[in-house]
Structure formats: structure tokens, C-alpha cells
Amino acid sequence: MNSVSTDTTSTGTTSAGTTSTQGQTLSDLRWAEWKAIGTTIRLVVTDPAQLDSARSMLEDDLAALDAACSRFRDDSELIRLEARGGRPTTVSALLAGAVRAALRGALLTDGLVDPTVGRTMEAIGYDRDFAAVPAKDGAVRVTVSHVPQWRQIHLDDATNLLTVPAGVRVDLGATAKAWAADRSAEGIARVLGCGALVSLGGDIAVAGQVPPGGWSIRVQDVTGDPLTPARGPADVITIREGGLATSSTSARRWQRGGDLMHHILDPRTGRPADSDLRTVSVAAGSALDANIASTASIIRGRSAAGWLAKLGLPARMVAVDGSVTTIANWPEAAS
């Protein structure tokens, strides 16, 4: 599925061992890391005996998410919905939940986080899993401006009856990973009775038992292994609940002609956001709300500081010149 890149990395501890696809002992924690849905998955649990079960649950969740919500799979439920030509269709609870999360993002940001940008994303070259997107290609010719149509998407919460305007390709990448992280972390904590941290490409959700001292998370400007020295500005902070997300123009970049492209689209222009911020990290009551706010903040640029402060959302903003600003009681760096 379309993955919005984030640069938050997490280990659940600041003194983890080497990254591995197998669980490794981290004091009283266990963790695993692997690749899925076009991004890096990291899972940490507070009960070492539950890691295998938690991983199995998360893998099942991600497989179902991809089958329902990917815009890169011809057989996904989302793509098959287009064949309905704008007619109301009863969809799975999973797709309905992901669409509901996307519409929440559009509503809270007045359309800056817009799930109807799928065709425009394809036009600028993001038309497949990012690993397969050519790093360089011919110039982009965008001949039609994006017309936001998220208000024309109708979802009946009681029946999961979904109507998408004919010709619209929905892109759930801006919100689905964060929503899925919340959903999976809560499910693992509830079923297995342990604490869980789920990071899907850096969209981080925590639930259940909190490890002593909280969940330690490295927030950095350049994507990298959290167990190696950070490149660029970085902090290690501690959270105890909710979620954390980072949006950045420093990752998922490619060239078309002489233009440098990235994955955060400004719906007002139909082009990658031309922002004076390169990275924004936000802590919120959920990974979903943190991701909605961080994505919209990149598009807003410097004006995001006042918007986030008014909402009371702790945030860390890195400008294109590398200067760092924190607002609204951003968590203090872990000792």
C-alpha cells in the first residue's frame, strides 16, 4: 500500500542490541523487525513470552490491511471498488475503518490531508510500491489540477455502505499506516495482556503495560537504524501512551526531469508540498491523529507552529536549514 514515510524510529529502549528480524532481549523487553507493506515494521512487547504470538497477530493484520487498502494491487478491495463506477457498495469493516480514518484526516485539516489524490500521486510518478519507483525519470507533465473530492465520499457507519465518486482513485497512504498501528497495538495489548509498541514505517502506537520509565523513542531527521548514530538532528524522548508520528520531505524522494519529487502532496497545487519545513514530529492521543497533524504541518510550513500550539499538540519541527523548534510541551529528551 502507499506508505507515507516517517523518520521516527523506535526500539522501546535506548540501549537495544543490533537490529534483527528475530526477537532480541532488550532488558525485560523483546522485539522484532521485518519488512512488509513497503516499509519497515518494528514490534516491541513487554512480555518476552508473547513476542511470537504478537508478531503473528501483527503479520495477519498487515496482510489484511494490504489486501483491503493497497492502491498498488489490482486485486485489492480498494481498487476493485473503482469498478463500481460511483455506485454505493458494502465494504469490509477493515476498509470502512481505513476510509473513516482518512476522512477524519481531511476534515480535521480542511482538506490538506486529502484521500482523493491517488491519480495525482500517479501523475507525479508514485504509481507503485516506493522501492520500485525509478529514482530518476523523464519530466512530469501534469496537465490537470487536482480537484479535491473527499467531501463527495460517503460512508454509512451503520452498514459500511461506501460511495466514492466515479473516476476517483482513493489513496489511503497518508493515514492507513498510523490507523493500523493504533489498531494492532491495542489488539495485541488486549489479547495478550502485555504492553506493545507497533511502528509501521515510523508511525508509532503504544498500548497496554508501560515499561519502567516509559517507551523510549528516537526521533530523527533522516531515516536510519535506531541502533546506529543518527544523521542530522535527533532526540530520544519518552512517551507512555498514545502515538507519535513524523512526516518528512527528506525521505521517499525521486526525480522527474529536473524536478525533485517527494511523497507529501499539497492538494491545493497537485504538486509535492513546497515547504520551509523538512520534518515535523507530533505526539498525540493516537498515531492516527499524530500523523494527520504532522502531514498537514509539512504542507502548512511555518504557519504550522501556531496551528499545532492552538491544538495543544506537542511537536518538533525541523526547518530546511536544519534549525529545530519544539512547541506545546514536546517531551523532554530521555536521560
Image (cartoon, grey):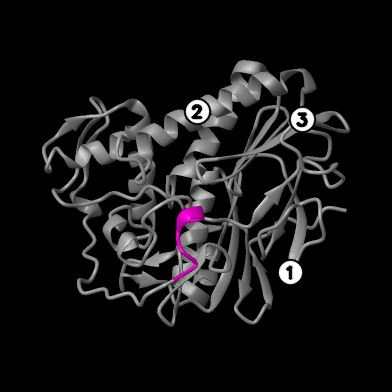
Q: Which residue is mark 2?
A: 61
Residue 107, how many percent across, how many down?
Answer: 33, 53
With 77 as the anchor, is 311 left or right in this view?
right
Q: Residue at x 70, y 61 (%)?
A: 220
Residues packed near mark 3 inside 10 Å, few (<14), some (14 to 19) or many (20 plus): some
Left or right of 212: which side holds 247?
left
Q: Is residue 158 above or below residue 239?
A: above
Report the span colored magenta.
Answer: 130-136
Identify the residue under disc 1: 233
Disc 3 secondary structure class: loop
Helix, strand or loop at disc 1?
Answer: loop
Task: Return the residue at label 3.
Answer: 23
User: Local crowd at mark 2 within 10 Å, few (<14), some, or many (≥20)?
Assistant: some
Name the foreground residue: 136 vs 262. Answer: 136
* Mark-to-mark CA distance, 3 and 2: 19 Å
Q: Does 178 sit above or below residue 125?
A: above
Numbered disc 2: secondary structure = helix
**What residue type is disc 1 on?**
Pro
Q: Amino acid at mark 3?
A: Gly
